[in-house]
């Protein structure tokens, strides 16, 4: 795991400054390559082939294999391609064997070298052969192009800025801001965040002009014509078009075991996050099943004596799998102390403080000497783990006129959970769009009406109002609404502490199979993730497999606002002149919401934290531009 940087002209000093700004992504080494056409930078977190042979930027020729300034530097000039790369290709050994039969030579044990050989053999289509996570840039000297690519689901980040003449790219936005890019808030994206609670759903970021390469997309920049082409190479919607497969818990088990086993490939120890929920517990138990004698270290968040504490479930996994258990916790004072660093780490706003729990777990893992952790992101999106999915399922049954099944499902949900909340959601999903839009607007009366009117015709949210089935809802969660920002949180939090995070539930073969299954394989009769529970029946503790509650790495967002330290902290923000002057909200209405929340009359936690976090983001990234140390390169285009 690493960090990459680059741009389409030569400037050694600037690319080194970019590297320095993301040193946390790769504390084990640094490399640069500069010529008259490009500047490429790399910081390395050594995971596979820890020797200097894995150094980047890496060069490659079919006859000589890989080379770099630390490994066979004499071969660099004879190599037609060079790469900076962040990620892991888990099937690189199989691809290497195939390429060796085609006459390719190899001089390292890295997956990086295999990517370059694959590019020379299969061109831009090489990415379709990869199983894993990646963000890379290949400089093809013969074709005079830069080829950028991001993995199918966007596990690894990749940002870029194109002004019509020059291209700049990086793993993180903070490195981009070393360039003289004007920093302006993207009001359209801020609207989507405040009004629709959307994040990372389009190529646009909160910084106007800075874009992300979307999941399953590639970018080709012609260094001669200065033209940029963005193309999509992977579309999960094609899976839905193929129709449903018959549920097979044995096949699911095989795919899941394979996904976990692949992600144990490393030349350093591999541990796992352990929340105590079904997802992380499944990963830890499978790690033990595929390697009964391995030393496995787990890392958990606990809140002794509080309702959100999950230590009893974590303990059940620890005792069954005989793994090392490391725990951490935090107070409201800790959150207030670290929130600026969290905002700096994430680079873009977030809706709740739940990601702070993940931040603390990654910090603990780093303190204990870990470099690689597995985590459960993606499970809820492919297996319908969120209870709002029941509403989509009920609506699908209603549309299909399966009345008896619908009644049975509603009664089963009520019996298990004591609620009929999904029925309310079902009705909402069945309403005409114009009614839903009107109801939504009333919900956000604390926002500035002029701000809402400015963007009210954006169609961003309407995709979620036109869902006709559970599988369509899952597809949207995986490609638009949920998974994208969760993977951003995961990457930024883990790499802040120089930890590589791997997510088995985002294995594309597992995702494709699960999405192809009928709804009942994922949730029915009040129970979520049915096929996972069935597939791992002999692996999971019964306490976990039969668990119906879902918490995850939860944080006490609601209560924090009612503590003395939390109240004072937020009061200082919402009473500030900058907060009052923002064009996004009515500050008096936000203040009223705050005191309603503090008194316990209503729970406004989500909307209050969104406003507070956005205000802190504006102060850090827009108002205080000097903190970014932006530099003028003296190059062309923007500069």
Image (cartoon, grey):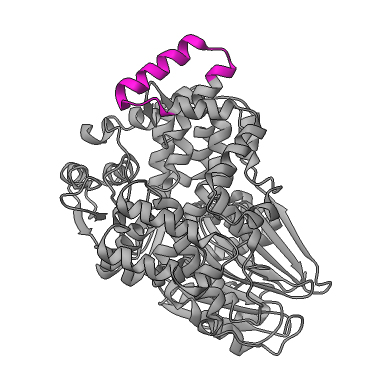
Residue drawn at x 64%, y 37% as measured from the top left: 237
Q: Position of residue 121 (x, y in %)?
A: 68, 58
Residue 572 in the image: above or below residue 475: below
Residue at horizontal 59%, vertical 78%? 177
Q: Is residue 403 magenta?
A: yes
Number of marks: 0
Q: Is residue 46 left or right of residue 219?
A: left
**Residue 37, horizontal then vertical, whole percent:** 73, 81
Give the magenta range.
Answer: 397-421
250 to the left or right of 148:
left
Q: Is residue 246 above or below residue 184?
A: above
Q: Report whether residue 394 is seen.
A: yes
Report the front residue among 277 and 34.
277
Farthest residue, direction top = 404
What residue sits 46% from the left and 22% below the top?
Answer: 520
Coordinates of residue 510 in the picture (x, y in percent): 48, 39
Considering depth in this image, is 391 or 273 the residue closer to the camera? Answer: 391
Q: Position of residue 368 (x, y in %)?
A: 24, 67
Q: Nearer the viewer, residue 457 or 400?
A: 457
User: Can you tell which quarter of the image residue 301 is in?
Assistant: bottom left
Regarding residue 57, the answer to whether it shows in the image is: no
Q: Main secondary structure of the magenta part?
A: helix
Quadrant where the C terminus is found in the figure: bottom right
Q: Is residue 322 above or below residue 178?
A: above
Quadrant housing the N terminus: bottom left
Whether residue 631 is in magenta: the answer is: no
Q: Is residue 198 above or below residue 21?
A: above
Residue 105 location, quadrant: bottom right
Residue at the right extreme? 225
Q: Is residue 309 left or right of residue 566?
A: left
């Amino acid at each position: 795991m690493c960090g990459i940087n680059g741009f389409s002209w030569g400037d050694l000093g600037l690319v080194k400054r970019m590297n320095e700004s993301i040193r946390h992504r790769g504390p084990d080494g640094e490399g640069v390559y500069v010529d008259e056409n490009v500047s490429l930078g790399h910081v390395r977190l050594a995971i596979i082939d820890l020797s200097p042979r894995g150094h980047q930027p890496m060069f490659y020729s079919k006859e000589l294999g890989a080379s770099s300034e630390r490994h066979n530097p004499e071969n660099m000039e004879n190599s037609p391609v060079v790469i900076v790369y962040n990620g892991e290709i888990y099937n690189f050994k199989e691809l290497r064997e195939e390429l060796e039969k085609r006459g390719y030579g190899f001089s390292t044990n890295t997956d990086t070298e295999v990517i370059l050989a694959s590019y020379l053999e299969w061109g831009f289509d090489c990415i379709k052969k990869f199983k894993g996570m990646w963000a890379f840039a290949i400089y093809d000297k013969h074709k005079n192009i830069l080829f950028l690519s991001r993995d199918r689901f966007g596990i690894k980040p990749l940002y870029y800025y194109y002004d019509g003449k020059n291209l700049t790219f990086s793993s993180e936005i903070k490195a981009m801001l070393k360039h003289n890019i004007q920093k302006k808030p993207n009001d359209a994206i801020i609207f989507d965040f405040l009004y629709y609670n959307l994040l990372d759903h389009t190529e646009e970021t909160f910084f106007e002009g800075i874009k992300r390469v979307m999941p399953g997309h590639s970018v080709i920049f012609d260094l001669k014509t200065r033209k940029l082409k963005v193309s999509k190479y992977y579309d999960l919607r094609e899976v839905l078009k193929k129709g449903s497969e018959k549920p097979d818990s044995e096949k699911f088990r095989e795919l899941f075991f394979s996904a976990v086993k692949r992600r144990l490939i490393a030349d350093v120890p591999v541990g796992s996050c352990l929340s105590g929920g079904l997802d992380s517990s499944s990963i830890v138990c499978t790690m033990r099943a595929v390697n009964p004698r391995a030393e496995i270290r787990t890392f958990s968040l606990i809140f002794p004596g509080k309702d959100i504490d999950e230590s009893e479930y974590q303990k059940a996994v620890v005792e069954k799998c005989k793994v090392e258990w490391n725990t951490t916790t935090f107070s409201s004072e800790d959150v207030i102390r670290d929130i600026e660093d969290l905002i700096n780490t994430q680079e873009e706003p977030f809706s709740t403080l739940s990601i702070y729990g993940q931040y603390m777990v990654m910090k603990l893992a780093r303190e204990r000497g870990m470099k690689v952790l597995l985590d459960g992101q993606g499970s809820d999106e492919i297996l319908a783990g969120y209870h709002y999915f029941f509403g989509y399922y009920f609506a699908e049954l209603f549309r299909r006129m399966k009345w008896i099944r619908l009644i049975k499902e509603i009664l089963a949900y009520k019996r298990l959970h004591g609620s009929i909340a999904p029925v309310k959601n079902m009705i909402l999903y069945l309403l005409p769009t114009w009614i839903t839009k009107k109801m939504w607007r009333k919900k956000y009366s604390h926002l500035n009406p002029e701000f809402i009117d400015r963007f009210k015709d954006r169609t961003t949210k309407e995709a979620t109002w036109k869902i006709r089935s559970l599988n369509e809802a899952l597809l949207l969660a995986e490609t638009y609404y949920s998974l994208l920002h969760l993977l951003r949180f995961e990457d930024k939090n883990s790499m802040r502490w120089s930890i590589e995070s791997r997510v088995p539930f985002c294995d594309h073969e597992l995702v494709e199979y699960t999405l192809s299954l009928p709804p009942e394989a994922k949730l029915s009769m009040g129970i979520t993730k049915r096929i996972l529970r069935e597939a791992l029946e002999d692996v999971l503790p019964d306490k976990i497999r039969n668990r119906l509650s879902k918490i995850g790495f939860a944080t006490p967002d609601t209560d924090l606002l009612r503590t003395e330290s939390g109240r004072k902290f937020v009061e200082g923000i919402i009473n500030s002149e900058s907060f009052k002057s923002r064009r996004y909200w009515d500050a008096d209405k936000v203040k009223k919401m705050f005191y309603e929340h503090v008194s316990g009359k209503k729970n406004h936690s989500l909307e209050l934290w969104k406003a507070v976090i956005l205000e802190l983001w504006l102060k850090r990234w827009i108002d205080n531009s000097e903190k970014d140390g932006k530099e003028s390169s003296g190059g062309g285009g923007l500069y």
